[in-house]
Image (cartoon, grey):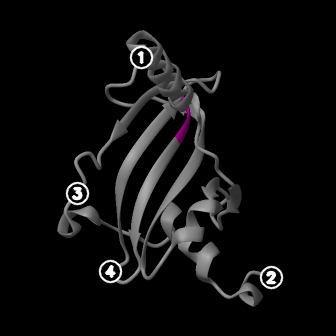
Amino acid sequence: MLKSFLSIIIYSVSIFAQQEETHSWKVVDADDGTKFWYDASSLDTTIGDKFNIWILENHQPPSKQEGVEGEVFRSKTLYAINLTTAKYGILKVIYFDINNQEIFSYDYDNPPLPEDIKYTYPITDQSMLHFLVKELFEPKENKIK
């Protein structure tokens, strides 16, 4: 009986560990010619002026990151954004190789960061997060070129 119970637990854990997050990626063609994607599904649970959002970037040419073995061709980053203060923080980052295999990840939010240091960096003009906020909140009639 105990053996069967342990087998079920191990099987369940392995299935849950293999499940991937589902994202609904939308492209942002920034004014400066860059392109990146954001996870629109994460906006479904946004309440108020603070939210978390995944951003996916392709790196051409591939980048080298300190502490990461190999070249980084894609990265997926979870940002925490505070619209009131126009600041952000990085919660998680995942790096991928040329075969789209994860080569490194780090969770900056484990344990969870206190609110006073969660949003450390300013959202500056012409930055990726500036283009994201513009895409999400600029009136649609201003987007027509």
- Which span of residues is magenta-colored? 71-75
Nearest to the eye among marks 4 and 3: give it.
3
**Relative to residue 121, is residue 70 depicted above or below?**
above
Among numbered discs 1 and 3, the one appearing first in the sequence: 1
Among numbered discs 4 and 3, the one appearing first in the sequence: 4
Mark 2: give few (<14), some (14-19) or many (20+) Cα within 10 Å: few
Among numbered discs 1 and 2, the one appearing first in the sequence: 1
Q: What's the residue type where badge 4 is placed?
A: Thr
Q: Position of residue 113 (x, y in %)?
A: 22, 57
Name the residue beneath numbered marker 2.
Answer: 144
Q: Is residue 73 magenta?
A: yes
Q: Position of residue 139 (x, y in %)?
A: 68, 88
Quadrant in which the C terminus appears = bottom right
Q: Nearer the viewer, residue 62 or 74?
A: 74
Q: Quadrant of residue 141?
A: bottom right
Name the residue beneath numbered marker 3.
Answer: 113
Q: Quadrant of residue 122?
A: bottom left
Among numbered discs 1 and 4, the one appearing first in the sequence: 1
Instruction: Name the side, left or right, on which 117 lies relative to 94.
Output: left
